Amino acid sequence: MNTIAKHGYTLNELAERVGATVSGNGDALITGLATLHDAGPEDLAFLANPSYLRFLQDTHAGGVLIREEHKDACPVPALVLKDPYLGYAMLSQLFDPMAMKQAPTVHETAVIADTATIGERVSIGPHVHIGAHVTVEDDVVIDAGVAIGDGCIVGKGSHLYPNVTLYHGVTLGERCIIHSSAVLGGDGFGFAFNGKGWTKIAQIGGVRLGDDVEVGSCSSIDRGALGDTIIGNDVKIDSQVQIAHNVQIGDHSALAGCVGIAGSTKIGRGCLLGGGVGVAGHLEIADRVQITGMSLITNSIHSAGVYSSGTGAMPNAQWRKNAVRFKQLDEMARRLSRLEKR
Amino acid sequence: MNTIAKHGYTLNELAERVGATVSGNGDALITGLATLHDAGPEDLAFLANPSYLRFLQDTHAGGVLIREEHKDACPVPALVLKDPYLGYAMLSQLFDPMAMKQAPTVHETAVIADTATIGERVSIGPHVHIGAHVTVEDDVVIDAGVAIGDGCIVGKGSHLYPNVTLYHGVTLGERCIIHSSAVLGGDGFGFAFNGKGWTKIAQIGGVRLGDDVEVGSCSSIDRGALGDTIIGNDVKIDSQVQIAHNVQIGDHSALAGCVGIAGSTKIGRGCLLGGGVGVAGHLEIADRVQITGMSLITNSIHSAGVYSSGTGAMPNAQWRKNAVRFKQLDEMARRLSRLEKR
Amino acid sequence: MNTIAKHGYTLNELAERVGATVSGNGDALITGLATLHDAGPEDLAFLANPSYLRFLQDTHAGGVLIREEHKDACPVPALVLKDPYLGYAMLSQLFDPMAMKQAPTVHETAVIADTATIGERVSIGPHVHIGAHVTVEDDVVIDAGVAIGDGCIVGKGSHLYPNVTLYHGVTLGERCIIHSSAVLGGDGFGFAFNGKGWTKIAQIGGVRLGDDVEVGSCSSIDRGALGDTIIGNDVKIDSQVQIAHNVQIGDHSALAGCVGIAGSTKIGRGCLLGGGVGVAGHLEIADRVQITGMSLITNSIHSAGVYSSGTGAMPNAQWRKNAVRFKQLDEMARRLSRLEKR
């Protein structure tokens, strides 16, 4: 697929970029990244998770990013550094064929309001719609089929992938990345029961993203009912995530796939939410809280730490017996107390 | 963002609209809505949830929608009524800058089949596609990038936000709101195993929505296998929801984010499903059933009430110990019985 | 909605297609499919699930696909065969009005790169974008608003419904069906913490689908970090599903709605994952594993069978008492042991 001539770097050049020391011949040319198992002689690999140590001795990589402790076991040149995973992350951009940007162009089929302000070096793909009073800052990429509502601001260097939708009044900081089919600024889920049916509450607030926010494909960030839904700097949101109205998420927090956060909840800074986690509305989650996958949080969490709910998986026949007992658990506890008093 | 001149209303005018009595000066001009905490002197606030009572005494709002019992504690003019939240909902539309509609236009890039019927005062945005034999009734708004399949009917006053997809044979009642990236009428998940692999079951039914249905962003409502998937009047569906083929949902029910309903299940009228709830297929859920967040329902529910499953969240170290015991629960119950017989 | 003249088949013709024997008059004309309950005299119905047996005696169907054991209870002509559900699946395509394809056309508003290769009898809808070096094989249907990134391959006979997005470097086998708002090839969720914030890991791999893969609406299949995310032949993926980077799914597996699979996990062949199931990252799930709805899998599963986690639903008042006891479960187990030693 990659018809572009590959860039190459020597191991010495790569070591310099990540502050590693080279063990072995540093002149070897590297043209790609791969896993220990798949790497060929022009690929750089890395060993971060010790469970992959078994692949080290047979690797055909041209070089391996590795910690000091594993250096001697490495059969090929090593780039020795403290955090091989971070080193790999830092170098990954070099080998991404998509990072070699084409010259920015605005496609003739894009429909852009007269009152929109478009910066320098902006790419706008086919069938894009940009509404009134929108500001698109420099170096932004807007792919095919994106729709941007009135009054939005798209910060410098941001990238909106195909078929993203921003409703009116959505603000993105710099270097934000929004993946396809994601929707920012849709109405929050607000209704009051009027005795006969639901009266809709107009969702008058907006959505504000800080700098360096990434939003995965098919994720939803709803606009505020009153005031904005606010996503801090460097927040990373995976695919299939639902962020309800007036949620606030602190800087550097990361939310894995299928997470749902209900309305007006505040997530602290540096939090890590596992896949499928649900957080009820109107809660406060402290900084540096970590929640394991598919846990449900129905009360505020006041201190950093790891939190969980649920039960482990087991064979269904065994599970059925235990699940039945769960329904008797309170009764069992009472019987236990009675026995203790005998 | 809001470059439109704000509409203003006196407290007296607003009180009349919601049937409130004014306590204090009713001539003050209100130009917006805000929370008690954020409101300025031209904003109307409301006090519905008593936990926000602490913000009342310091509010700078121009007026507050409030219940009789809290009137005396209100430092600013009060609009006194039974249900402040409903009052707020009723007034919210007045202050939505988006509610001031522009003149309806059909964008020149929209592709509309010759056999489609388009009503009066219909807005059709850029890059829309409307298929054969579609009926779009009066006062409908269809935003950029929407695709509408053959034979659909879009009821009077409905609004389809950007990048919505309706497959063929989808019928929307009046005043429906469909948010971006939502998909109505995609194939239900139907396959028969033929001994070697899966034979696809053509999904021949359609999707029918009643009046006043709202569907959140990135939600899916699949078409029926045989016969239609049917959503009643005034049903509210949040973002990231999955409604499988041949599901039926009764009038006025509300489904929060990330809910999933499996095939052929019937949800009653006036049900409330919390975020992330899952309901298995071929079940019947009675009217006025409420299910708390992330519960899994695998049996029909025959009477109104509140239902739950799952376990509460706790610190991970504690949870691990308890989760291990869950796997021993049946054995524990047997040991308990044995002890009781001693 | 269906303005196309219906095709008709005699019961004898239909029986021949599925290898059934006709009991009763085989000359009756059938023009549609319906359930036992809804069928009229020109409809064919089927009885697969015994719980629908109660509808048999009053059916007005023109014929019923049925097993030998129920034949005598059938008041109308019967097509007798071993697997009525499979028979229904095989015939369903005949009666799908959408299966009567229109002549393939490429819409004038589609934007197709000069370097793309488009096969014979390909349909391309309005507002489509096809990038550089894309290969679209024969008999493919690409609906309105679809965006296909550089270097993709869309296999023979595949169908991409409106507003699907394929990022660059995504390969689809033959006869794949991708439903609306689905996103294939979005970035996997990969970041390394650099002490101050997150360093993004470029997602350099792609996505590869085998033949006969179906992907539901609003589902995400992320591209690999290094190497591809790989979906086997005849894999069926429902709506609202999240497949993370470098996941591998074996042939003939089926994933119901709202499933989430975390990164680098391998799902075997012939697996069935119920709605809302979550599987953690870096696991291996054996062939023919079945996981019940909303279970969380955090360890590899080494043998075929049915697996579950969670607790059953119950009235909330009862649940609250039991859920509190779950937090005391380890303590209860210790108390139980102590009692046994008395």
Image: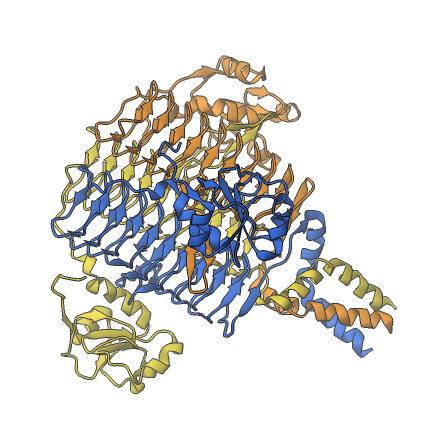
Chain colours: A yellow, B orange, C blue
Residue C239 image position (x, y, % from top left) = 43, 50
C167 up-or-down from B267: above or below: below
Quarter of the rendering containing residue B142: top left
Residue C328 image position (x, y, % from top left) = 69, 63
Q: Quadrant of the C terminus of chain A?
A: bottom right
B190 up-or-down from C273: above or below: above
Is A171 or C32 nearer to us in this picture?
Answer: C32
Q: Is residue C27 shown left or right of residue C341? A: left
Q: Is residue C112 shown left or right of residue C181? A: left
Please indicate, yes or no, whether residue C282 appears anywhere in the rendered image: yes
Residue located 24% across and 58% down the image = C169
A260 up-or-down from C302: above or below: above
Q: Is residue C76 shown left or right of residue B146? A: right
Quarter of the rendering containing residue C342: bottom right
Q: Is residue A12 shown left or right of residue B86? A: left
Q: Quadrant of the N terminus of chain A?
A: bottom left
Is A314 or A152 nearer to us in this picture?
Answer: A314
Count of marks placed on residues: 0
Please indicate, yes or no, whether residue A286 appears anywhere in the rendered image: no
Residue A109 image position (x, y, % from top left) = 17, 36
Is B192 or B41 nearer to us in this picture?
Answer: B192
Residue B115 image position (x, y, % from top left) = 29, 27
